[in-house]
Amino acid sequence: MRLQRKHAKARAFRKHFSLRPVVDRTGHIKPGQILLFSTLRDEHIRLPYFLNYYRDMGVDHFLIVDNDSTDGSGDYLADQPDVSLWHTRASYKRARYGVDWLNWLQASYGHGHWTLVVDPDELFVYPFCDTRPIRALTDWLDGSNVRSFGAMLLDMYPKGRLDAVPYRRGQDPIEIASWFDPGNYMISKNRKYGNLWIQGGPRARVFFPESPKKAPALNKIPLVKWNRRNTYISSTHMLLPRGLNLVYDEWGGETASGVLLHAKFLDTFTHKAKEEMQRKQHYRASLEYKAYVENLRETPDLWCKWSEKYINWRQLEILGLMSKGNWA
């Protein structure tokens, strides 16, 4: 494990040479501030809501890698006073799907900070998020001597065709993609790294009905008190040192956890899926995106009679998809 961690950190160091700083405002970062890290490509339509959502939550600074966007994402981000931006034309796949880039940025700027790693289509929800800023959560985690916080990725989708309602720039995507699968999830334990492995939901139900174990993983550990010795191994699914992956209680109790509302499935999705299938920069030669394109060609609709409409985090806790644990 130690050798694997050193190898991952060495990869991150090598890959950072492909990053070009566009606007570096990291000198404004103060001790104890909460930082958000993300990699993106052509997400201009999502960025206004994404940034404001996390600003309102209490994120202090954004460190973002733009993987050669052509839709103005880079220019928009460069104008934001709380964003530091890097640009690269390098292969997303060869950077382990962006993990190497962000590992380097977190090692360089995240040491000693609580860091949140999310994609522009992921909205972090945690216990009491409607009344308490993220600082309240990280203060409680610090007081409990907890260094990492898990969140299940919950795929959100509209009722009816994905392309029926156009998404407007700056709009809350959950106004459109407001439904989710309340059940239909498989959970196993990764014996090597100690983390839970979760699959299921609409992507298994619709795109991989005959082979649900090929469906994307839904387990993530997006919030971590970062240390230079830490490294993500596979997206935000798991980390080293291995103890950071123990974000659940093995003894029958409940550990506080959250959810990432995954607003991928909007009217913009079909075009994006076709583009990513051709680029082949995603896992397993973009097999996932091939399944998306093939299954949505005739009936772009993920809703079913078991779908449930999203209300708030308390609803997700009742359904067992997240927990407040002993945080009161």
Image: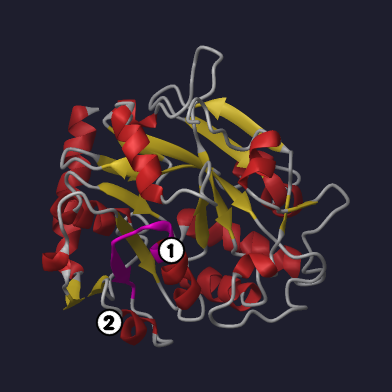
Indicate left or right for 288 with 49 as reference: right
In which quadrant of the rendered view does residue 160 lie? Answer: bottom right
Task: Give the farthest residue toward the top.
Answer: 251
- Which amino acid lies under the numbered mark 1 shown in the image of this protein? Asp
The residue most toward the left is 27
Visible residue check, residue 82? yes
In space, the residues marked 2 and 1 are separated at their CA atoms by: 20 Å
Return the mark for residue 78. 2
Apparent side of residue 29 relative to residue 175 in the rendered image (left or right): left
- Please name the residue shown 38% across and 31% down the image: 245
Question: Measured from the top left, where is residue 289 in percent x and y?
Answer: 59, 63
Q: Which residues are magenta?
A: 55-67
* Way the structure is coloured: secondary structure
Q: Is residue 57 magenta?
A: yes
Label 2: few (<14), some (14–19) or many (≥20) C-alpha neighbours in 10 Å: some
Q: Residue drawn at (56%, 74%), measured in percent from left and top?
A: 272
Name the residue located 35 percent from the left edge and 47 percent from the top edge: 135
